[in-house]
């Protein structure tokens, strides 16, 4: 498998394909945080992984608390962030891992729809796949 870009590198690559843009919209910070969390989780194991998951859930909750949705897409994003916030602290449960994966995929679709293709597909989808593979084999 090819080495993966960091979420920030993927974001910058996406922006470089759109020279007239400075961002993809109001959700960029949220997307970068989620991608960063999934990236870290995909590489961590054991107690460190649990600690990262709890810290990510807290950070996602804090950031989501600052968002006032102006569109249906932003409201949908907040619903997925709530799913992540609830699911991350209990990532060892198979059902919860599935919820986190599902919420992450929906957020990845939003990223891709906005034009952040590398960030959505390379970072989030691949990190989630790695995470699910690792978790699924232990949670069964």
Image (cartoon, rainbow, N blue to C red):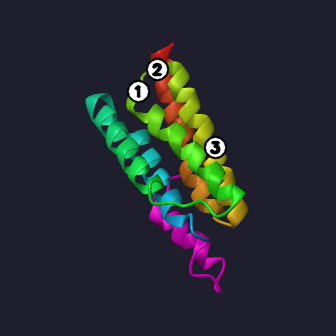
Picture coordinates of residue 29, whole percent (x, y) = 48, 64
Q: Residues within 10 Å of mark 3 (few under 14, many from 20)?
A: some
Measure how far apart labels 1 and 2 are at the Cα level: 6 Å
Label of residue 93 in the image: 2
SS label for mark 1 = helix
Residues at circles 3 and 1 in contact by the CB criterion of under 8 Å: no
Magenta range:
1-24
Mark closer to the chain start, 3 or 2: 2
Picture coordinates of residue 101, whole percent (x, y) = 57, 36
Q: Above or below — where is 118 with respect to 89?
A: below
The residue under the point 72% across, 60% down is 113
Residues at circles 3 and 2 in contact by the CB criterion of under 8 Å: no
Q: Nearer the viewer, residue 53 or 47?
A: 53
Q: Which quadrant is home to the N terminus?
A: top right
Residues at circles 1 and 2 in contact by the CB criterion of under 8 Å: yes
Measure how far apart labels 3 and 1 are at the Cα level: 19 Å
Label of residue 105 in the image: 3
Residue 12 is one of the magenta-drawn residues: yes
Q: Which residue is mark 1?
A: 90
* Residue 66 in which image quadrant: bottom left
The residue under the point 48% across, 66% down is 9
């Amino acid at each position: 498998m090819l080495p993966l870009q960091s979420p920030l590198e993927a974001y910058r690559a996406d922006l470089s394909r759109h020279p007239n843009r400075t961002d993809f919209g109001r959700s960029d910070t949220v997307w970068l945080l989620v991608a960063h969390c999934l990236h870290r989780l995909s590489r961590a194991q054991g107690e460190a992984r649990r600690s990262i998951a709890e810290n990510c859930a807290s950070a996602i909750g804090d950031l989501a608390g600052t968002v006032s949705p102006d569109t249906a897409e932003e409201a949908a994003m907040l619903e997925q962030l709530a799913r992540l916030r609830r699911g991350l602290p209990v990532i060892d449960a198979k059902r919860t891992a599935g919820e986190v994966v599902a919420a992450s995929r929906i957020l990845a679709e939003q990223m891709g729809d906005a034009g952040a293709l590398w960030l959505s597909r390379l970072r989030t989808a691949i990190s989630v796949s790695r995470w699910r593979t690792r978790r699924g084999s232990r949670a069964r």
